Image (spheres, grey):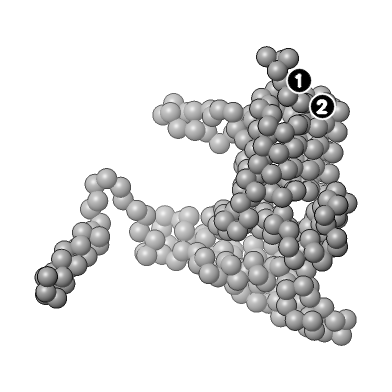
Amino acid sequence: MDRKNILEEIQRHVEILSSEHDTAFQYIPLHQRPSPSIQQIREIMLLMRSIVFPGFFGTMQEAQPQSINYYMGVHLESLFDLLSEQIFHGLCFESCGDCDGRERSQEITLAFIEQIPQIKHLLSTDVKAILDGDPAAKSVSEIIFCYPAIHALLHHRVAHCLLKLGVPVLPRIITEMAHTDTGIDIHPGAQIGEYFSIDHGTGIVIGQTAIIGNHVRLYQGVTLGAKSFTLDDAGLPIDVPRHPIIEDYVTIYSNASVLGRITIGKGSIVGGNIWLTYSVPENSRILQTNVNNAK
């Protein structure tokens, strides 16, 4: 096949792929308005990591007493510029018409920055919970540098805050980045308390309407999912509470599936490989023998 024939064949497919008349499915024409940048959102999360854990992921000077204020100011100013731009793009992404949300995006960004001390506090409790509960963890520094749980929780706590501030699409992008990096899938809508510990973490799934209390520990493969969906008259799923409520001081071991809007009472233990679809009171011990006897 000569070059002319190759170019003609390529041009034929250019016409097909450029067509806006696909009868099977029509993509939203994002090129007609700004849309979020994955690369810029990654940069935002790198900045957040440096802000929350100063000195761990930047230069040694960033955590020195005489220079920490300077570097924190530089990071926060960069964060404001990048995040306000991406929030603006997110607002445009959601809008059906022209987007004029520049001022709103800046206001949301400042409101988010006000929440960063609380995000830092929550993450510090998560680090402490892992250190206290994992004999393999040798130091706080090791946990911050190495543990996928902290990577996933940094992304989740940022995304959850942005979601509460009314930011569209960005929260889901942020949590899916962590999902890709760690295998831990936490929807940004999930509510998670203090001292949350994830051991290993691979394969954990936490649904949108899950509520998790304080001092909760999950092991790999745990699913906090929905048992079924409520449908509207058109047969489409309705966004209603459908995931579990996990009260304080609960431990759920590997590969357990806790499904539906049920409550796992304070201080309970759910054993590995359990399929649990009913609420249990405080201080319950749910093991394979318990489940088999309940059937």
Indicate the quadrant where residue 68 lies.
bottom right
Q: Quadrant of the C terminus?
A: top right
* Label annotation for residue 290: 1
Q: Please state the horizontal and vertical placement of residue 42, each as a whole percent of the image.
A: 58, 67
Mark 2–mark 1 CB contact (< 8 Å): yes
Q: Eyeballing the image, is 164 above or below 113?
A: above
Secondary structure found at label 1:
helix
Q: Nearer the viewer, residue 114 or 57?
A: 57
The picture places residue 20, in percent across and down from the top left corner, at 25, 57
Rendered residue at 75%/66% (across/down): 145
Tell me, yes or no, if residue 69 can be seen here: no
Q: Is residue 286 visible?
A: yes
User: Residue sitting at 79 percent across and 48 percent down?
Assistant: 196
Q: Residue at x 70, y 23 (%)?
A: 278
Which residue is more in the foreground, 71 or 183?
183
- Left or right, residue 278 beside residue 98: right
The residue carrying mark 2 is 285
Q: Position of residue 221 (x, y in %)?
A: 65, 41
Task: Looking at the image, tell me whether mark 2 or mark 1 is earlier in sequence order.
Answer: 2
Q: In this picture, is 252 found above or below 82?
A: above
Circle 1 Cα neighbour tier, 10 Å, few/some/many (<14 / 14–19 / ≥20): few
Q: Using the image as rendered, state which of residue 196 and residue 97 is in the foreground.
A: 196
Mark 2 element type: strand
